[in-house]
Image (cartoon, rainbow, N blue to C red):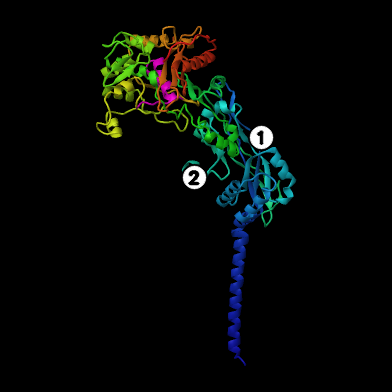
């Protein structure tokens, strides 16, 4: 076939145009890739070649009021794996499991971390033991993506003695990662789970650093150092608390392994928490890097509930320690004076629809309010509750903040139980489903009246001062006080003198006296609903009387009698005030 010369020329021009356009397009593409997008492609190349290895930052050191260490970071090891896919990671981990202990749950947790953070090394052990590291180092050639590095781990020198307030740390969970509170956190990182570790997470967490390794196309490490300058991790500023570590240790020793309950010691003037303990306790060091299953099962199955913070979360009938609140309400409303006697003397009980007993079966006779506080006469306070009236007693309790949390700077504080008004009973029990005689039980700290140990310590801080209640604070801040009642100077002096008589030969806690220190306080023996078990023992008080420096609230589960708790409390006071205790006879009942 022949073509006309004009056709050949036309086709030649078209072909030249197409070639020119192709060359122009390629030139533009090359220019864009080599010049315009050079930085982007260089970065992508670097990312394909380099892997960022996080450098764990140490958490902030926590100190007591005198600079002793409560929590710190010590050297440890972490083990991570670089894997391109979840399946390859699972295969590598199953091979690892033949050399070191690695459960199926741990394997699946690691796989989930990779799926969430595919560009980060997957943490296998955040707190590897020296034995684990030794075994893995010997097998490093079998695992090209294996990364073993030094990593700080949390350590609590006093362990169980501080667990009630310091809490513990653990790996961040999926739900936490999805929470706005933890924006910016990554899988595998450690966060505070309880206590001040959780409350002050933002202050205690450090800034994560980075180092870089070179990997091949299959994600295997081919150069572990020098690929790019490291970005060092930075530690946060230390956190200083109000805790007196010597007192905290002493209190933990008082409870030992046999007692159940809690204690709160605080400065009544500032609200500074000097000690807070819940017994039995747990060792927060066992939680670091993942709690062993057998230890976790042991804690959860223990009927004494070591994971339940009895000082913050436990709500118990305050028993006779509440009689001071009833007294304050009566005095403020002018329905009673410290020298007033009730119409019916105590003969061992009071009939009001049914027979309400006094703890002293033989009776106390005719008493003044001051004497009734000292002797803890139930019959007197039954009648005082009736004189105040249910509506006024409930309103008085609300004013004294017995329905409110203390506001301590620790998480998970329970709300106390106190009826807001008569309507509370109608809603809970139905109209006609309750008896107005409930006022008798409320007046002596029973019935629908349950308080935390912390809240009772807070209330007694007002008795120790001018009626202003201090907000409890574990970490040093500006003191915060709230005026909750106003008594005359004469009334306040009379109430305090009655409280000092409790810790004397005339009162219910003579066995808790201190040599050289005048202690003011109140015992309590709380009934509960667990059949066949002794009553709970309470004591709340302050010392020294002339210039109170410490308030101590103690509750011992199944402690039988208030004087038992009083002995623990005054020993703690004596230790703090550096005074010896008296070893006295057993006496008193409430």
Image: magenta residue range: 448-472
In front: 464, or 296? 296
Q: Secondary structure at mark 2?
A: helix
Q: Horizontal placement of 335 versus 53: left or right? A: left
Which quarter of the rendered picture does the C terminus lie within? top left
Query: Who comes first in sequence, dot 2 or dot 1?
Result: 1
Instruction: Report x, y in % for residue 308.
Output: 49, 31
Q: Is the residue under label 1 in contact with that under label 2 (CB below 8 Å)? A: no
Residue 85 in sight in this render: no
Location of mark 1 (residue): 75
Instruction: Using the image as rendered, state which of residue 440 and residue 227 is in the foreground.
Output: 440
- Label annotation for residue 175: 2
* Quadrant (top left, top right, bottom left, bottom right) of the N terminus: bottom right
* Image position, residue 85 (x, y; %): 61, 55
**Which residue: 61% across, 57% down?**
41
Residue 254 is a magenta residue: no
Q: Which mark is residue 304?
A: none
The relative height of residue 494 versus residue 119 in the rendered view (above or below) is above
């Amino acid at each position: 076939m022949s073509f006309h010369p004009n056709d050949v020329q036309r086709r030649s021009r078209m072909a030249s145009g197409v070639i020119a356009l192709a060359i122009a397009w390629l030139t533009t593409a090359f220019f864009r890739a080599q010049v315009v997008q050079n930085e982007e492609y260089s970065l992508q190349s670097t990312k394909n070649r380099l892997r960022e290895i996080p450098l764990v930052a140490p958490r902030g050191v926590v100190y007591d009021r005198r600079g002793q260490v409560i929590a710190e970071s010590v050297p440890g090891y972490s083990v991570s794996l670089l894997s391109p896919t979840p399946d390859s990671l699972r295969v590598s981990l199953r091979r690892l499991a033949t050399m070191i202990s690695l459960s199926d749950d741990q394997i699946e947790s690691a796989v989930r971390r990779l799926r969430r953070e595919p560009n980060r090394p997957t943490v296998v052990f955040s707190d590897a033991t020296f034995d684990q590291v030794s075994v893995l180092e010997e097998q490093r050639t079998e695992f090209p993506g294996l990364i073993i590095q030094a990593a700080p781990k949390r350590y609590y020198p006093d362990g169980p003695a501080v667990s009630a307030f310091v809490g513990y740390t653990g790996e961040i969970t999926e739900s936490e990662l999805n929470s706005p509170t933890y924006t910016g956190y990554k899988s595998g990182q450690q966060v505070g789970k309880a206590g001040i570790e959780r409350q002050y997470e933002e202050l205690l967490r450090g800034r994560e650093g980075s180092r870089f390794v070179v990997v091949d196309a299959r994600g295997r490490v081919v150069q572990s150092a020098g690929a790019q300058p490291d970005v060092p991790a930075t530690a946060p500023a230390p956190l200083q608390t109000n805790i007196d570590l010597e007192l905290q240790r002493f209190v933990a020793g008082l409870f030992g392994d046999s007692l159940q309950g809690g204690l709160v010691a605080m400065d009544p003037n500032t609200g500074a928490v000097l000690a807070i303990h819940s017994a039995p306790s747990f060792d927060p060091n066992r939680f670091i890097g993942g709690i062993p299953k057998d230890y976790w099962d042991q804690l959860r199955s223990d009927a004494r509930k070591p994971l339940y913070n009895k000082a913050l979360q436990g709500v118990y009938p305050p028993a006779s320690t509440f009689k001071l609140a009833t007294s304050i309400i009566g005095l403020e409303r002018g329905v009673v004076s410290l020298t007033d006697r009730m119409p019916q003397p105590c003969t061992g009980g009071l009939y009001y629809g049914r027979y309400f007993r006094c703890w002293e079966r033989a009776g106390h006779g005719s008493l003044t309010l001051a004497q009734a506080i000292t002797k803890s006469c139930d019959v007197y306070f039954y009648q005082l509750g009736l004189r105040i009236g249910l509506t006024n007693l409930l309103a008085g309790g609300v004013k004294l903040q017995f329905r409110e949390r203390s506001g301590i700077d620790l998480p998970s504080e329970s709300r106390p139980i106190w009826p807001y008004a008569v309507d509370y009973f109608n809603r809970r029990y139905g109209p006609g489903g309750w008896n107005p005689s409930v006022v008798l039980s409320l007046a002596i700290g029973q019935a629908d009246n349950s308080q935390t140990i912390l809240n009772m310590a807070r209330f007694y801080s007002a008795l120790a001062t001018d009626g202003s209640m201090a907000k409890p604070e574990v970490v040093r801040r500006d003191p915060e006080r709230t005026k909750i009642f106003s008594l005359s100077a004469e009334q306040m002096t009379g109430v305090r003198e009655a409280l000092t008589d409790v810790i004397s030969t005339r009162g219910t806690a003579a066995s808790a006296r201190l040599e050289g220190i005048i202690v003011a306080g109140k015992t309590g023996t709380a009934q509960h609903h667990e059949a066949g078990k002794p009553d709970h023992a309470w004591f709340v008080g302050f010392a020294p009387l002339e210039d109170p420096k410490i308030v101590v609230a103690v509750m011992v589960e199944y402690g039988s009698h208030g004087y038992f708790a009083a002995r623990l409390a005054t020993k703690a006071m004596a230790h703090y005030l550096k005074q010896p205790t008296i070893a006295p006879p057993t006496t008193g009942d409430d």
